[in-house]
Image (cartoon, rainbow, N blue to C red):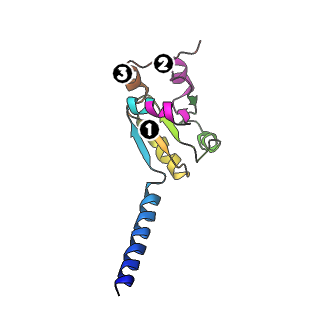
Amino acid sequence: MKTRILLFALLMFIGVSSCKKEANKGEVKVVSVEEMQSLLDIEDIQLVDVRTPGEYQEGYIENFQNIDFLSPTFDEDIAKLDKNKPVILYCKSGGRSASCAKKMVDAGFVKVYDLEGGISKWQHEGMEVKVLQ
């Protein structure tokens, strides 16, 4: 009888653990400037600026590619990214990147990070921004 109870408890634990892991899959994590710096140092990440091309030309974070969230080709553009590789998103202040992050999770992206406060906060914290010449 004890063996059956232990076996049942073990099976319940395994079932709950696997559900918990599945629930975490595809979540959006909002990250601070400091957390983003750490991620850039330790992970191989796809970097995406979701602002318009005009905003991008005014200044951007190095190594980020521009995929305009407002573009009619946005869905096709993000489909070219690797869904299994982490993505960091930013916009001007966080609104568009939050919408984009949700859209990417819905499209099956596994790990999506959203820079809290966008490039505005990045600059406010004294981080470097590049300008197209």
Image quarter of the C terminus: top right
Q: Residues within 10 Å of mark 2 (few under 14, many from 20)?
A: few
Amino acid type indicated by mark 3: Glu
List x then y, in percent, for residue 96: 45, 37
Q: Is residue 99 above or below residue 57?
A: below
- Residue 113 within the magenta-colored segment of the rendering: no
Amino acid at dot 1:
Asp
* Crowd rating for badge 1 (residues with CA inside 10 Å; few <14, some 14–19, many 20+): many
Residue 1 to residue 53: above or below:
below
Taking the view exactly as shown, the residue that stands out farthest to the top is 133
Residue 117, quarter of the rendered image? top left
Look at the picture and state if 63 lies above or below 88.
above
* Residue at 53 percent of width and 46 percent of height: 104
Distance from disc 2 to disc 1, alpha carbons, whole Å, reads 18 Å
Q: How far apart are the two marked residues, 2 and 3, measured between alpha carbons?
A: 11 Å
- Residue at the (35%, 88%) spot, across then down: 1
Q: Which kind of residue does numbered mark 2 sit on?
A: Val
The numbered dot on residue 125 is: 3
Q: Which residue is mark 2?
A: 129
Report which residue position mark 1 lands on: 114
Give the tally of numbered discs: 3
Asked if residue 73 lies left or right of residue 27, the reply is right
Query: In this rendering, is residue 16 above or below 106?
Result: below
x, y percent for residue 44: 56, 36
Q: Which residues are magenta?
A: 38-63
Q: Is residue 126 left or right of residue 59?
A: left
**Which sits in the foreground, 40 or 26?**
40
Left or right of 119? Residue 87 is: right
Near-viewer residue (71 or 117): 117
What residue do we see at 45% from left, 50% from top? 27
Question: Which secondary structure lies at badge 1?
Answer: strand
